[in-house]
Image (cartoon, rainbow, N blue to C red):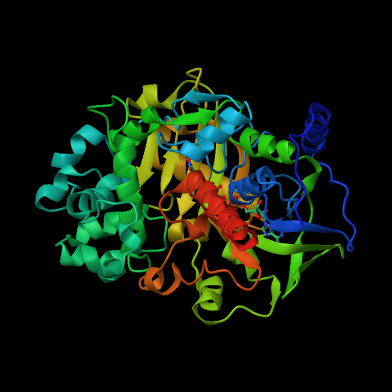
Amino acid sequence: MRRPLNKPSRRKILQGATILAAGTLASPRLRAAERTDVTIIGAGFAGLNAAILLADEGMSVTVLEANNRVGGRAFTADHIYGRPELGAHQIGPYYARIRDMAQRLEVELAAGSNFNAPYTFAIGDTLIRKEEWENHELNKTVGAERTALPSAMQGFYIGKHNPFEGFDDWLEPEAARFDISLAEWLIEKGISKEAMRLVNAGLVAPDASSVSLLTLLQEATRGRLMSGAGDSKGKDRFEQYALASAHVVGGTSRLPEAMARHLGDSVLLNKIVTNIDLSDGGADITCLDGTRYQSDFVISAIPFGPLRRVSITPALGGEQAAAVRHMPYATNSQVHMRLKGEPFWEQDGMDASLWSDGALNIVRQPLDYDGTRNRLVAIGSGKKGERLDQLQPKERGEFVVREIERLRPSTKGKIEVTGIHSWPQYDFVSGCRHSYGPGQVTRFAHEMIKPHHRMHFAGEHTRRLEIGMESAMESGERAAYEILERTV
Ligand SMILES: Cc1cc2nc3c(=O)[nH]c(=O)nc-3n(C[C@H](O)[C@H](O)[C@H](O)COP(=O)(O)OP(=O)(O)OC[C@H]3O[C@@H](n4cnc5c(N)ncnc54)[C@H](O)[C@@H]3O)c2cc1C
């Protein structure tokens, strides 16, 4: 049952804008008896892109979003001082879908992104300038490793030995031999004990033995192209990315908000899906508030963490069920801070951001686009993030301030906590990103995206060629086309 979806009227767009701006509950437009062609669960980039593409093709859609806002892991914290991005920010130079969507919906992008003050290194509590690292007595790495900054050790090895050229090489059968732990591979490549310690200190995953090398190789292959874009010679990899990238003016959230406005009253907020019942005739979806939505097809565009809590009938089986149950998600715990008084980096003469092998991973000083330098954000990932998350939010902030002041006395009395955010603790997300363990790419990557009856799968965890927001868009596109192919 298709109906043409006309371009939404200006009135409809404004109506959507009011709902989103007020953050209020969108009224349940549909009663249980009403049907649309496709129900999409999750209003992140994956779900919203799938919905727009299907609507473009004349299908009727309903998007059910558990939260009181759209965007998922794109979250501009308008409520925190400096309006930091809690999630996605950087739009890579080759993010064709994100860039096209911004253009289509007249959302303004501007050049550059994620500019940080350069890092000082805190190794065993000693502050070391990056220029001093190679010959510093605390640099216990060996041979050519000595030239790699502590924060770049993993990139040093992967950059040197990455066997992949094509973006889909990681999904080829012969790539299975690289579906081993990062630790195993680094040992094979001759990494020293100290370099391995530094790799572990900066990892997003708990440690190098718990993450599959294959995912990292995919990201590095994609990243190689990005850092080659633009004219950024002489800069490090992160600066190259930042210079060749873009950001959404006014915050990343403005883009998914515009996508939702475009879809108008098809997007329903505060709809926590709890049950998906599939039959030959379609899908019957129930939300926590008792409302039901019926459709011919359903797209699950939610991470596997929250999907574990959804009852699916008939149940998923085999490796697909195992993927949903076991896919690891990475930690990302953030403490946002405002700076007071004289610039501490001028006082101690060292770069303002900090990379540490201690309790925190990094303390970044974001450089605002107008040049303002009055914020810091401490990020705990891997095991460090888990330890931070064990503290209550207030204690977490106090711990981070104490730790920064201890490492860097010039910051004493100059830091004030403005916001706390943890992705594993944030409802309906479960972690900052999926993170395949060793052997899991081979087991899961192909199986877990196969349609289950009338249910299709999207989301960054189902990515093929892209990374980040673009991979979510890519996955929504794939799921939409799978359904379109079934309906011709
Ligand atoms: C700290 C951080 C920094 C990042 N930086 C970048 C970056 O700079 N550049 C980049 O490209 N990418 C970045 N990313 C990655 C990017 O944010 C994600 O890849 C992308 O936003 C994922 O989109 P998604 O649609 O797959 O999932 P999500 O954005 O997680 O959307 C899923 C949606 O499903 C909803 N949901 C969950 N359960 C239910 C349920 N039961 N019922 C209904 N709805 C439900 C959730 O509320 C959510 O809105 C970053 C991510 C993080 C966390």
As drawn, the residue found furthest toward the top would be 370
Query: In the image, residue 203 lies at what x, y percent?
Result: 37, 55
Does residue 173 lie above or below 335 as drawn? below
Q: Quadrant of the C terminus?
A: bottom right
Query: In the image, residue 276 lies at what x, y percent?
Result: 73, 70
Who is closer to the viewer here, 40 or 23? 40
Please indicate, yes or no, whether residue 230 appears anywhere in the rendered image: yes
As drawn, the residue found furthest toward the front would be 488
Instruction: Using residue 221 as the reference point, say whether residue 385 is left or right of it.
Output: right
Q: Give the number of callouts.
A: 0
Q: Residue at image x 18%, y 50%?
A: 160
Q: Residue at image x 50%, y 20%?
A: 372
Who is closer to the viewer here, 441 or 464? 464
Q: Quadrant of residue 231?
A: top left
Does residue 66 lie above or below 437 as drawn? above
Q: Residue at image x 52%, y 38%?
A: 98
Instruction: Using residue 439 as the reference point, say whether residue 233 is left or right of it.
Output: left
Instruction: Using residue 157 as the reference point, say whether residue 181 is left or right of it.
Output: right
Q: Quadrant of the N terminus?
A: bottom right
Query: In the image, residue 216 lies at what x, y percent?
Result: 34, 56
Query: In the image, residue 71 lies at what x, y percent?
Result: 64, 44
Who is closer to the viewer here, 48 or 80? 48
Please indicate, yes or no, whether residue 330 appears anywhere in the rendered image: no
Instruction: Using residue 281 as the reference point, say whether residue 145 is left or right of it.
Output: left
Who is closer to the viewer here, 111 or 376? 111
